[in-house]
Image (cartoon, rainbow, N blue to C red):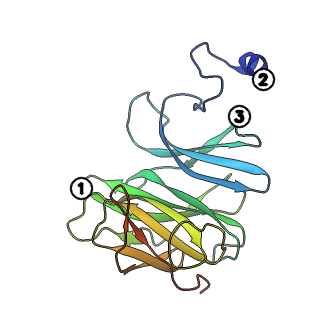
Amino acid sequence: DAQSLGKENDSNYRPLVHFTPPAHWVNDPNGMVYLNGTWHLFYQHNPYASIWGPMHWGHAVSTDLVSWKHLPVALYPDENGYIFSGSVVVDLHNTAGFGANALVAIFTHHLEGRQSQSVAFSLDRGRTWQKYAANPVLLAPEGRPDFRDPKVWKQANPGFGDLSDPEDFESAIKRTPENEFKTKRLNLWVSSSSAWLPDGVWASRALDNVLP
């Protein structure tokens, strides 16, 4: 209840229910996923200051979506750029070859004037992460400096909205009106045909079975 939450709250200025990081900048939630009784929340985070800066992926876990345990930063910037928004999926059938039940993050790498999509994975319930050696896996179409925030989901049939099937993956990427993308595995994407979604989002269909 609110009273017990208040006792755990370490600051009069920290919300009682809404999630906040241990300190400093937070914005977009990323890669929210459920695995083995635990909710994982990743988020855009600058761990060094209370203003926007070099974006990392912060990480916290919860069993009730109210009380959160903070974990170490999941993804750090590297030579490909800052770590912008993205998604996480549970790869139940090892479609990417990283391991069954791997958590696989698909995210935007941002360098000034260039954005691309990359992959990282965890085999220990998100406690440690390894970036795919061949990143980035998807480059922006020609003339598209804004190419970010991939939203990846599992899809049973051609179309959008059915999230139940464990075999096919689709991705929607902001501000990409010329292309959609499909994949046979989470670390290999190719250009496909276009389909319009609301609010300026274009989408990718993985019409093939994801298994290699």
Q: Name the residue carrying label 3.
A: 66
Residue at 37 percent across and 38 percent down: it is: 53
Residue wearing tag 2:
1
Q: Is residue 196 left or right of residue 185?
A: left
Q: Nearer the viewer, residue 162 or 151?
A: 162
Disc 3 packing (10 Å; few <14; some 14–19; many ≥20): few
Please say if 179 is above or below 112. Answer: below
Type of residue at label 2? Asp
Disc with the residue nearer the chain's start (2 vs 1): 2
* Mark closer to the observer (2, 1): 2
Residue at the spot of label 1? 113
Q: Are marks 3 and 1 in contact (CB under 8 Å)?
A: no
Q: In the rendered view of the protein, which quadrant contains the N terminus?
A: top right
Mark 1: give few (<14), some (14-19) or many (20+) Cα within 10 Å: few
The three-letter code of the residue at mark 3 reads Val
Residue drawn at x 58%, y 30% is 20
**Residue 2 circle label:** none
Q: How many marks overall? A: 3
Using the image, determine if residue 24 lies above or below residue 110.
Answer: above
Q: Are marks 2 and 1 in contact (CB under 8 Å)?
A: no
Disc number lying in front (3 or 1): 3
* Mark 3 or mark 2: whose residue is earlier in sequence: 2
